[in-house]
């Protein structure tokens, strides 16, 4: 997570990248971060669900 933040700040400070490209890069990086969080939550909730089902049996 810290690495991504560093990469984003380097990109934002880079004068050779125009603002449209910076915007695209930010959107993509936030999308990747969000997907990781969602998949982690999904895996956690699936594990809890399976645990509950096994206990009911």
Image: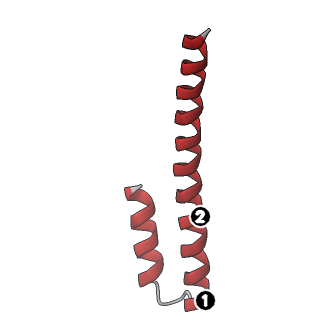
Can residue 18 be seen here? The reply is no
Q: Which residue occupies the extreme top position in the image?
A: 57
Residue that mark 2 sits on: 31
| Label 1–label 2 contact, CB within 8 A | no
Q: Nearer the viewer, mark 1 or mark 2?
A: 2
Q: Is 23 above or below relative to 32?
A: below
- Measure the alpha-carbon separation of dots 1 and 2: 17 Å
Q: Earlier in the sequence, mark 1 or mark 2?
A: 1
The local crowd at label 1, few if under 14, some if 14 to 19, many if 20 or more residues have their Cα within 10 Å, is: few
Residue that mark 1 sits on: 20
The local crowd at label 2, few if under 14, some if 14 to 19, many if 20 or more residues have their Cα within 10 Å, is: few
Q: Split into 4 quadrants, where in the image is the N terminus?
A: bottom left
Q: Which residue occupies the extreme front position in the image?
A: 56
The quarter holding residue 4 reads bottom left
Helix, strand or loop status at disc 2:
helix
Residue displayed at 62% across by 79% down: 24
Name the one closer to the observer, 9 or 32. Answer: 32
The way the protein has been coloured in the rendering is secondary structure
Residue displayed at 59% across by 64% down: 31
**Could you tell me residue 5's position as x and y percent?**
40, 65
**Could you tell me residue 54's position as x and y percent?**
59, 13
Residue displayed at 58% across by 27% down: 49
**Could you tell me residue 34's position as x and y percent?**
54, 58
Can residue 30 be seen here? The reply is yes
Compared across the picture, whether 1 is left or right of 26 comes to left
Helix, strand or loop status at disc 1:
helix
Q: Is 54 above or below relative to 43?
A: above
Q: Is 49 above or below relative to 35?
A: above
**Could you tell me residue 33's position as x and y percent?**
52, 58
Q: Is 44 above or below relative to 8?
A: above
Name the one closer to the observer, 34 or 41. Answer: 41
The quarter holding residue 21 reads bottom right
């Amino acid at each position: 997570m810290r690495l991504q933040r560093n990469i984003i700040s380097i990109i934002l400070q880079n004068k050779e990248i125009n603002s449209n490209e910076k915007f695209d890069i930010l959107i993509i990086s936030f999308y990747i971060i969000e997907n990781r969080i969602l998949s982690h939550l999904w895996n956690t909730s699936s594990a809890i669900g399976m645990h509950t089902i096994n206990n009911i049996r």
